[in-house]
Image: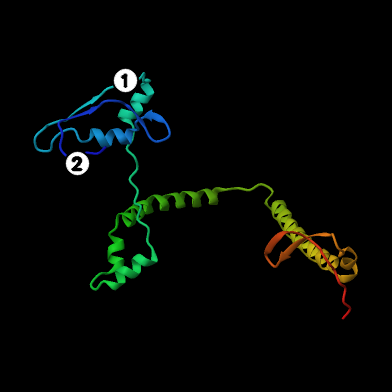
């Protein structure tokens, strides 16, 4: 439960909580959020936090709760077509101006230097990369590509051959199980009830 009010002391009656699935230790982010209320602005030099441990806690768990990092703060803003259309309907509102000053855009801009640095590092790694027997590998790749093309052509020829009437008709009789397919759609198996051969 969160309280939007100043407090000099924050008391944790338990270091464990039930999250709907398990009874676990509170996370460092939850501890920081609740203990951060301790200390009234402009009145107290420091706040007091009391954590009552009613279960045996290892030193690693205690360190993780008290000295752990805060939960990352990520924008959940998602741009949709309806949002853009609603902004365009309002006079005097520039959608680009609003989006450029959103926290989501700030996070993206903040990540650009790191992404550029990683891209430069990867470019240097690619330039320094040396592949042994490069010609043999290239030749093998070309052979594998040609083999795939030949196999695809052969499969096409086989399909055309087995669908020719002189090979297909002898198998089309009542009681035969067939797999029904239409272009890219694959249906369930069916049974031939009646087959009539018509010469055109």
**Colour mapping:** rainbow
**C-beta proximity under 8 Å, tags 2 and 1:** no
Disc 2: which residue: 4
Extreme left residue here?
Answer: 43
From this view, report whether residue 179 is shown above or below residue 7: below
Position of the C terminus, as image quadrant, is bottom right
Of 164 and 180, which appears nearest the observer? 180
Q: Which residue is at 26% across, 37% downward?
A: 1
Residue 6, picture quadrant: top left
For the residue labelled by badge 1, is the local secondary structure a helix, a strand or a loop? Answer: loop
Of 160 and 175, which appears nearest the observer? 175
Residue 19, picture quadrant: top left
From this view, report whether residue 51 is shown above or below residue 138: above
Dot 1 alpha-carbon crowd within 10 angstroms: few under 14, some 14 to 19, many 20 or more: few
168 with respect to 111 (left or right): right
Spot occupied by residue 108 in the image (x, y as percentages of width and height): 36, 54
For the residue labelled by badge 2, is the local secondary structure a helix, a strand or a loop? Answer: loop
Q: Which residue is at 71% across, 55% downward?
A: 141
Residue 80, picture quadrant: bottom left
From this view, report whether residue 191 is shown above or below residue 94: above
Pointer 2 or 1: first along the chain: 2
142 with respect to 34 (left or right): right
Mark 2–mark 1 Cα distance, whole angstroms, equals 27 Å
Disc 1: which residue: 54
Q: Which residue is at 79% across, 62% downward?
A: 155
Q: Which residue is at 33% across, 29% downward?
A: 65
Extreme front residue here?
Answer: 193
Spot occupied by residue 103 in the image (x, y as percentages of width and height): 30, 54
Of 105 and 182, which appears nearest the observer? 182
Spot occupied by residue 86 in the image (x, y as percentages of width and height): 31, 69
């Amino acid at each position: 439960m969160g309280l939007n009010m100043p407090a000099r002391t924050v008391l944790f009656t338990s270091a464990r909580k039930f999250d709907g699935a398990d009874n676990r230790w509170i996370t460092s982010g939850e501890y920081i959020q609740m203990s951060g209320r301790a200390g009234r602005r402009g009145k107290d030099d420091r706040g007091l936090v009391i954590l009552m441990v009613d279960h045996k806690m290892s030193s690693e768990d205690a360190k993780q709760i008290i000295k752990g990092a805060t939960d990352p703060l990520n924008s959940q803003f998602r741009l949709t077509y309806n949002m853009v259309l609603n902004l365009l309907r309002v006079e005097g509102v520039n959608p680009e101006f609003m989006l450029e000053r959103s926290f989501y855009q700030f996070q993206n801009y903040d990540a650009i230097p790191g992404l550029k640095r990683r891209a430069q590092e990867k470019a240097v790694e690619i330039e320094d990369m040396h592949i042994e027997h490069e010609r043999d590998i290239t030749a093998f790749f070309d052979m594998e590509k040609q083999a795939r093309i030949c196999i695809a052509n052969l499969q096409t020829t086989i399909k055309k051959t087995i669908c020719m009437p002189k090979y297909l008709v002898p198998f089309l009789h009542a009681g035969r199980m067939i797999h029904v397919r239409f272009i890219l759609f694959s249906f369930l198996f069916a049974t031939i009830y009646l087959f009539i051969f018509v010469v055109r």
